[in-house]
Amino acid sequence: MLSSINHPLLCSSFPKHGYCSSRTRICSIVRKKRARTMVFASNEGNSEVGVQVSEQLYLGLDFGTSGARFALIDKGGTIHAQGKRDYPLYKRKETVDWVHSWKQTLFLLLEDVPFHLRQIIASISIDGTSATTMIIDSTTGEPLWRPFLYNESCPDALPIVKSIAPENHTVCSGSSTLCKLVSWWNTVDSNKESAALLHQADWLLWLLHGNLGVTDYNNALKVGYDPELDSYPPWLLSQSYSQLLPSVKAPGTPIGILKEDIRTQYGFAKDCIVCTGTTDSIAAFLAARATKPGKAVTSLGSTLAIKLLSTGRVDDARYGVYSHRLDDKWLVGGASNTGGAVLRQIFTDEQLENLSEQINPMKTSPLDYYPLPTVGERFPMADPEMAPRLHPRPESDVEYLHGILESIARIEAKAYSLLKDLGATQVEEVFTAGGGAKNEKWTKIRERVLGLPVSRALQTEAAYGAALLALKGAQQCAQ
């Protein structure tokens, strides 16, 4: 069971610039509504109602790359309900209408929450894919342009962004939110005066609370927001398109009460609050319960991604390394192109399972590979011309798989070593998420190569991390 008060993103600190005043106002409204609810329950003379009101739950929604999930937890972290939805595909002029798809999925997930639990949901939060960018009308909230997806690159804007941003800044990547904003700004001639920028999670949260122009400092990082200074930097504010930038709050900060029409339609409580969210990768890290500096999460999916909780901030665009703020700490991350995608090119799932069983994880493999699905590596070695190295191949498939798994483990070790060299906290323990976490032999190999305790994360779903942010917001209003 999760002890929620120990999580770094569940503390009582808040950003500067007057955010506490709006939080105080929202929480005051919530307390009044709850007081009226309790008076009503007392007048009804029904002890069961009083019990239900006090047993609050917290709803997290995760909008990932291929679908969305929800998780409903209590104060102790126990899951009371969860579910998932694939995105329905709507077409508009031969392209996918993602806006319609996301909106439809949001309300389908709300319908999927068990009806008898909706009345005791105290708060809601949402995470979305990092750098998925929306340009909307600042009055109506309606999109003015198709969304820029998380993995979409805007090379046309990169030289412009590099000319104004500090060297090796996080925004100096073609897929950054700022590059997408600059690309849009230089493409259109109209609607600029009424336009505003939101991220995917921000827009979905707006559908619930109705207050336009709010984001969180995790989503805002790739548009240039400085989480250390709690402000947009002068080099960004001096640009003409800075008028589109949203206000920024800490993840899990109360924004407003759930809109009345939604409360009525779906049967949520009158005092249910909506809180700022985060990115899907940050939410997944929160779910893994890596709560102290030196704790890290390695995600072994199609690629190998690592995130390390650090007391110091590290940013280096050369390696794709950047830091998200977690209150007074930093979540330092990077991603290699090695990972499960390479394994799937060579072995079937059945082969991987059977061959892994025959590996002796305590034996060092003499094979030295650099497994990549295609040409190019970004972290811990930034080399777009690096070719995959998967030879020589031994006659034994068991030895071959052993060599590949151990080579990926060595890349993981180099990645954590690089983060330390760049100034991050020394890694002390690694939790594992993703499909690779299920392979116990691989875990033992990694533990030997890293020289650290390695275990499977108890919770890995980003929706669970979003629910923790909802809990954080509710706890703020309870203070």
Image (cartoon, rainbow, N blue to C red):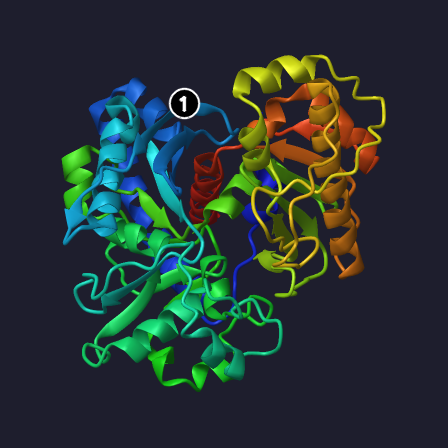
Q: Is residue 331 left or right of residue 133?
A: right
- Residue at 38 percent of width and 45 percent of height: 126
Confirm whether residue 245 shows in the render.
no
| Residue 205 horizontal/vertical position (percent) | 31, 51
Q: Quadrant of the N terminus?
A: top right
Q: Is residue 407 above or below residue 260?
A: above
Mark 1 packing: few (<14 Cα in 10 Å), some, or many (20+)?
Answer: some
Q: Where residue 324 sits: x, y (%)?
A: 58, 57
Q: Residue at the spot x=18%, y=43% of the render?
A: 90
Residue at position x 25%, y 73% in the image: 195
Q: Is residue 208 toward the left or the right of residue 340 in the image?
A: left
Question: Can residue 210 be seen by looking at this rendering?
Answer: yes
Q: Is residue 249 above or below residue 289?
A: below
Which quadrant of the figure has residue 390?
Answer: top right
What residue would you read off at disc 1? Answer: 80
Q: Secondary structure at mark 1?
A: strand
Give percent across and percent down for residue 88: 23, 37
**Residue sitting at x 43%, y 58%:** 131
Q: Nearer the viewer, residue 350 or 374?
A: 374
Snapshot quadrant of residue 321:
bottom right
Number of numbered discs overlaid on the protein picture = 1
Q: Position of residue 447 (x, y in %)?
A: 78, 30
Q: Is residue 39 above or below residue 175?
A: above
Left or right, 358 with respect to 467, comes to right
Kindly identify the amino acid type of the residue bearing the numbered disc 1: His
Q: Nearer the viewer, residue 53 or 289?
A: 289
